Image (cartoon, helix red, strand yellow):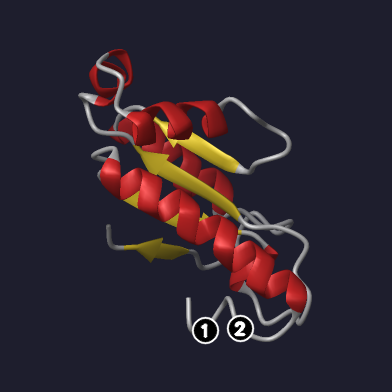
Amino acid sequence: MDRFAAGSVERKRLGRQVSRWMRLCRSSGALRFCLNGSFVTAKESPNDADAVVLLGSDFADRVARGNLDAIELSEILGMRPTEHLFAAEDRRDWDDWIHFFSRTSDPATRKGLVEVVL
């Protein structure tokens, strides 16, 4: 967050949003978290932060048991397009999201992503 959430007002706002996502993911037993979008570039005023989270196998149980952080995360995951956090429910889904996020307009070129250790 020191690198990406400092500087412009927009970077700070997106940094707060991403920090909230990460806190909820950690608390909800998520396994992996990857950032994409202009937030992880050098742009002074990025327009968005995109992320994918690999949910733990017990995520639905946490929601059903009333875990407030899991419920909030579930709500965020259903709020597209206002929130750009996407769910991967298994490793194959995760790999598909990573492949999608790393694409560029040139099929022979891939862009880098930022994976956050939860």
In the image, 69 versus 15, the foreground residue is 69
Residue named by callout 2? 6
Residue at x-position 67% and y-position 65%: 13
Q: Quadrant of the C terminus?
A: bottom left
Q: Quadrant of residue 36?
A: bottom right
Give how far across and how far down residue 89 sits, in percent.
35, 27
Location of residue 82 in the rendering, given as x and y in whole percent from the top left corner = 72, 39
Q: Residues within 10 Å of mark 2 (few under 14, many from 20)?
A: some
User: In front of the other: label 1 or label 2?
Assistant: 2
Q: Quadrant of residue 67?
A: top left
Q: What x and y, as percent, mark residue 90? A: 30, 29
Looking at the rendered structure, the kind of residue marked 2 is Ala
- Name the side, left or right, on which 67 lies relative to 3: left
Q: In the rendered image, is residue 110 in sight? A: no
| SS type, badge 1 | loop
Contact between labelled residues 2 and 1, with CB atoms less than 8 Å apart: yes
Foreground residue, 78 or 93?
78
Quick one: 9 or 118, which is closer to the camera? 9
Q: Residue at x 31, y 20 (%)?
A: 66
- Residue drawn at x 40%, y 43% is 53
Secondary structure, mark 2, is loop
Q: Is residue 61 at least partly visible in the picture?
A: yes
Q: Amino acid at mark 1?
A: Arg
Q: Is residue 85 above or below residue 47?
A: above
Residue at the top extreme of this rendering: 64
Of the numbered discs in the image, which one, if any, rests on residue 3? Answer: 1
Marking on residue 110: none
Residue 15 position within the rendered picture, expressed as x and y whole percent measured from the top left? 57, 67
